[in-house]
Image (cartoon, grey):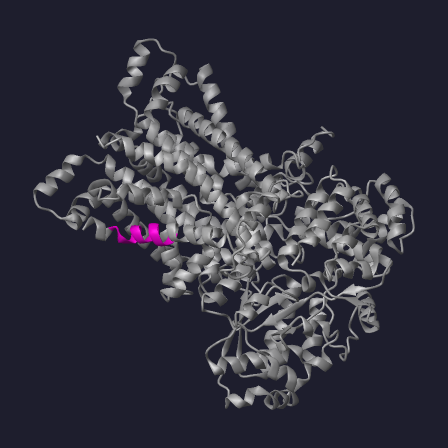
């Protein structure tokens, strides 16, 4: 612990003189059991290793509920000490408006550029060469979770890739099992589509559309295949009458559904249900086709305060969040991957290890949150929710509208 | 229009005849069916909150609990976590009280004076302002979030309890002013004129004549406001800080947590606990409420 | 003095309602994203708005919900009030039971009804377990009827208040009217429709304002019950406004949508106010 403190003193902190204890309010939307336990690691470290106090401002309901609150507080002139956003462009304008604390001095003193892996995470915190946020974890979407019990009941082997899964779907259906579980929340539909795209169209085509916003690729034959596959998947999800994603995961856990396309946060649900990877369920990164993961996740921003003591405390927290010990403790609880490659995650489970291996090989893509604006993502989300719920929309129609959104994307 | 108040107990149908007339069977039959329909959700909430999770998973939401457990209630009140603070709804209860009381008092005070000024003094432009207020009743709250952030920032009340009180007063104003205006219009104008002749001023008439006659409508306004403000989530969370977050924020956190197993029983217990204050007020003062509305909202 | 006393109201009316509305309208012509910025883009936001399928669906839903909600609230409210007005026993109990849902927030209402209407453990499951295996009742999971599933919950929450208002109105009708109509041998239903209802005009105006403002602002209920799904089948305009402004960080698009909503409201209210205040001097 001592070494960490002296490390902190090496940076900006000690410049502010003998630090007074500051109550730093941190807002976030991590309120479920595992999430709260993970946040507790941050709070514990902050309370123990510095003189300051972590004041918890949790708001459940993710972006929809929490973000207006955060933005109101910041623009209303009564900012919190630190706040969570997703990796990417959500806080871009707040930074441009000069409302966020510049962390560049801490980042340079500690060499964040060398320790953050993949470095693209730091890039999305960087605007005009200055660093404004701390990435804390990596969550990837590219997973399908398969129920061994369901496939056993249908008398087919557990598939090892998407094509086998599609082939097995009718058998599942015949045994009264919903092949693909999917909840009704809008983000689930667009997320699943993104996963299918990367798996079937490949990372190049995906990047052409989602990074370079090339509408021609989006309207082209490669994406046509993706939309056909999504239309087929749409039939497979018929009958999963659930709302929340974790209720859909529960269908897989109980063997009522064959599989679910969902991010790595789903494994927390399997853990809670005491299921073992490999014997009770399987996880296939990149749908078993393209073993690649996207590096979404969360980052913390520190709204600008007038008080230099508070500012010092903010920088201490920023530095702490990236420290090795805290990264390990936090990510094990959260079920996500750490943002630095040099930490030891021996306690990780099988699926997490698969993810770590892919990360180490560098088979990574940015998350769509990093490349497209929330507005464009929202339009895609609307299209996808409509498409996945309504069989009367043909794959070709949906593709046309999709290409149109990409053409107008910002 | 005093008969509106006095005559409230007088129902108009023909006098009841035999207990089991065909009319009575139809009448009570319909009412009992309707009552059952209205009670159903409350019944489901209570029954569910008394079950353990295994029993809930088995599935019949209408079945009474086999084993009654109060654990969900204890958990909802004292143990459920909001982020790192695991002290359940109890944390927000007193905050809700602290928010509700001044907000109710201020909003009603302002709206009653508005109604009085509109009904009895009819200053120039009164109808225009009244129309704007009615228009305001239709503005979605969400649209006004940012303009009000700016407004509160400019007057330096952002993030304070009093800022929130102002917000509640603003959004309560249209409907409350409508109620008070209608009520004061229905009072005999002679009273007002006589007081004017006696030389009483604006406030004199308000405090000495209007207020003493307006208990019913104040009860109505109070009930409406207590319900609305107590149930408010959006304003409470956007315009204040965590140390004064109302109870509904904890309710949201308990009910809306996207990860982990959904504990329906705790959700239901938390829901009932949060709704308890307005529910009790309705069950206790429902009679006054109806009487007040009968007196106030009816005469235009 | 009256004017001074009305200052809070005048300030609210001018600064918040008029000011906020104008501010909204002005910024709907900009390209504001996360923060309001005066970057003018003309009518782009409106063009995009009316080319957005979700907005069109939202409007359609609001129409269906609005018309049904208006009719059912008034009819159910009035019929229940008329039933309670028959000198019945336990009137207080019945009234309290019908009114209590109004004490619960829309979030709570939405959650409970989401549960009751869930096909896997709600009404459908119960009826099936009673032996009617093919019974289907899953309004929240069927695109074509989902808006009615929301309507059921909305009516449950709101009709109580309407019923109370109507009851109060009925109690305000002079007993002599009933006596006279009975003497003349006019059937009860005719008395209600042709004599009593026209006399209750002020009550109907109050209830109309209450119901209509509730309809335009319907938001929490949808969020709690369906989050707009399945697909986009139960989206409503207020939710479109909220989502574009705060979730999608496209303030101007949200402002454009709210401007359309406010315009629709103004089209209804201004003529009403003109009729109400313009032609009729107080008697």
* Predominant SS along the magenta part: helix
Q: Tell me the quarter of the image containing the C terminus of chain A.
A: bottom right
Give the residue at x 11% y 39%.
Answer: B194
Residue A372 in the image: above or below residue B288 = below
Q: Position of residue B218 (x, y in %)?
A: 29, 45
Asked which quadrant contains residue C147, the reply is top right
Residue A117 in the image: above or below residue A376 = below
Q: Position of residue B136 (x, y in %)?
A: 39, 46
Asked whether C10 falls inside the magenta stretch, the response is yes
Residue C208 as seen in the image, left or right of residue A116: left
Region of the chain picked out in magenta, as a range: C6-16
Asked which quadrant contains residue A286, the reply is bottom right
Between B144 and C117, the one nearer to me in the picture: B144
Q: Tell me the quarter of the image containing the N terminus of chain A.
A: bottom right
The number of numbered badges drawn on the structure is 0
Q: Position of residue C197 (x, y in %)?
A: 37, 23
Q: Position of residue A188 (x, y in %)?
A: 70, 52
Residue A251 as seen in the image, left or right of residue A15: right
Asked whether C275 falls inside the magenta stretch, the response is no
Between C94 and A354, the one nearer to me in the picture: A354
Q: Is residue B300 visible?
A: no
């Amino acid at each position: 612990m001592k070494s960490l403190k002296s490390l902190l003193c090496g940076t900006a902190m000690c410049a502010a003189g003998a630090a007074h204890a500051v109550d730093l309010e941190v807002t976030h939307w991590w309120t479920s059991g595992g999430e709260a336990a993970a946040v507790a690691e941050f709070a514990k470290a902050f309370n123990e290793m510095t003189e300051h106090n972590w004041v918890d401002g949790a708001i459940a309901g993710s972006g929809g509920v929490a973000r207006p609150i955060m933005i109101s507080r910041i623009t209303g002139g009564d900012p919190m000490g630190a706040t969570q956003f997703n990796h990417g462009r959500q806080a871009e304008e707040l930074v441009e408006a000069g409302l966020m604390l510049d962390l560049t001095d801490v980042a340079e003193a500690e060499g964040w550029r060398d320790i953050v892996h993949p470095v693209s995470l730091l890039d999305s915190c960087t605007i005009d060469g200055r660093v404004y946020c701390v990435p804390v974890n990596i969550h990837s979407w590219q997973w399908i979770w398969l129920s061994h019990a369901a496939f056993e009941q249908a008398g087919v082997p557990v598939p090892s890739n998407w094509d086998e899964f599609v082939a097995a779907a009718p058998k599942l259906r015949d045994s009264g099992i919903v092949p693909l579980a999917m909840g009704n929340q809008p983000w689930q539909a667009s997320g699943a589509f993104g996963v299918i795209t990367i798996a079937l169209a490949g990372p190049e085509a995906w990047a052409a559309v989602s990074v370079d916003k090339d509408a021609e690729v989006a309207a082209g034959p490669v994406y046509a295949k993706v939309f056909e596959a999504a239309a087929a998947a749409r039939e497979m999800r018929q009958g999963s009458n659930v709302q929340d994603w974790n209720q859909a995961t529960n269908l897989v856990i109980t063997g009522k559904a064959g599989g679910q396309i969902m991010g790595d946060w789903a494994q927390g649900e399997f853990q809670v249900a005491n299921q073992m990877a490999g014997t009770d369920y399987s996880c296939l990164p990149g749908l078993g086709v393209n073993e690649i993961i996207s590096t979404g996740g969360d980052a913390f921003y520190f709204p600008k305060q007038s008080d230099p003591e508070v500012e010092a405390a903010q920088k201490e927290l920023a530095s702490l969040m990236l420290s090795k010990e805290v990264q390990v403790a936090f990510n094990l609880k959260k079920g996500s991957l750490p943002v630095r490659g040099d930490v030891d995650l021996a306690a990780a489970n099988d699926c997490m290890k698969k993810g770590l291996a892919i990360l180490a090989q560098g088979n990574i893509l940015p998350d769509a949150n990093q490349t497209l604006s929330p507005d464009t993502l929202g339009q895609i989300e609307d299209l996808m929710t409509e498409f996945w719920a309504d069989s009367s929309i043909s794959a070709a129609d949906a593709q046309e509208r999709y290409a149109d959104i990409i053409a107008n994307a910002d | 229009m005093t008969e509106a108040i006095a005559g409230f107990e007088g129902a108009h149908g023909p006098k009841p005849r035999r207990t089991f007339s065909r009319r009575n069977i139809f009448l009570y039959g319909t009412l009992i069916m309707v009552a059952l329909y209205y009670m159903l959700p409350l019944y489901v909430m209570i029954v569910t909150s008394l079950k353990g999770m295994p029993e809930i998973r088995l599935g019949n939401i209408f079945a009474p609990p086999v084993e009654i457990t109060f654990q969900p209630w204890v958990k909802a009140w004292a143990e459920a976590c909001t982020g790192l603070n695991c002290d359940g709804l109890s944390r927000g209860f007193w905050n809700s009280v602290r928010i509700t009381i001044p907000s109710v008092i201020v909003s009603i005070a302002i709206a009653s004076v508005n109604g009085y000024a509109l009904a009895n003094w009819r200053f120039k432009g009164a109808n225009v302002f009244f129309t704007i207020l009615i228009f305001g009743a239709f503005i979605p709250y969400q649209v006004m979030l940012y303009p009000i952030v700016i407004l509160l920032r400019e007057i330096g009340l952002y993030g304070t309890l009093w800022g929130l009180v102002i917000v509640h007063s603003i959004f309560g104003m249209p409907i409350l002013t409508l109620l008070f205006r209608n009520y004061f219009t229905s009072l005999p104008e002679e009273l007002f004129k006589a007081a004017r002749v006696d030389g009483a001023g604006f406030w004199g008439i308000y405090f000495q004549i209007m207020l003493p006659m307006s208990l019913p409508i104040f009860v109505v306004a109070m009930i409406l406001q207590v319900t609305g403000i107590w149930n408010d989530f959006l304003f409470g969370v956007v315009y204040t800080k965590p140390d004064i977050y109302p109870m509904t924020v904890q309710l949201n956190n308990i009910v809306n947590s996207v990860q982990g197993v959904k504990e329906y029983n705790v959700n239901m217990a938390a829901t009932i606990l949060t709704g308890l204050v307005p529910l009790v007020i309705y069950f206790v003062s429902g009679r006054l409420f109806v009487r007040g509305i009968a007196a106030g909202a009816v005469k235009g | 003095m009256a004017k001074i006393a009305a200052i809070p109201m005048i300030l609210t009316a001018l600064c918040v309602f008029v000011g906020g509305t104008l501010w909204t309208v002005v910024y709907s012509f900009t390209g504001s994203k996360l923060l309001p910025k005066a970057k003018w883009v003309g009518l782009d936001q409106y063009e995009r708005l009316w080319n957005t399928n979700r907005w069109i669906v939202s409007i359609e839903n609001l129409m269906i919900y609005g018309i049904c909600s208006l009719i059912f609230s008034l009819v159910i409210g009035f019929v229940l009030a008329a039933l309670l007005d028959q000198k019945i026993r336990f009137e207080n109990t019945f009234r309290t039971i019908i009114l209590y849902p109004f004490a619960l927030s829309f979030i709570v209402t939405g959650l409970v009804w989401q549960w009751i209407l869930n096909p896997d453990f709600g009404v459908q499951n119960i009826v099936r377990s009673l032996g009617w295996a093919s019974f289907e009742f899953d309004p929240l999971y069927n695109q074509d009827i989902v808006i009615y599933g929301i309507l059921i919950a909305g009516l449950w929450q709101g009709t109580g208040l309407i019923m109370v208002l109507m009851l109060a109105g009925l109690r305000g009708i002079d007993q002599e009217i009933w006596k006279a109509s009975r003497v003349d041998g006019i059937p009860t239903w005719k008395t209600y429709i042709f004599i009593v209802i026209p006399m209750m005009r002020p009550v109907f105006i109050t209830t109309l304002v209450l119901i209509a403002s509730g309809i335009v602002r319907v938001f929490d209920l949808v969020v709690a019950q369906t989050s707009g799904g399945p697909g986009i089948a139960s989206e409503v305009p207020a939710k479109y406004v909220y989502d574009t402004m705060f979730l999608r960080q496209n303030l101007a698009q949200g402002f454009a949508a709210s401007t359309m909503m406010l315009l629709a409201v103004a089209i209804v209210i201004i003529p009403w106010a003109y009729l109400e205040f313009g032609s009729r001097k107080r008697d």
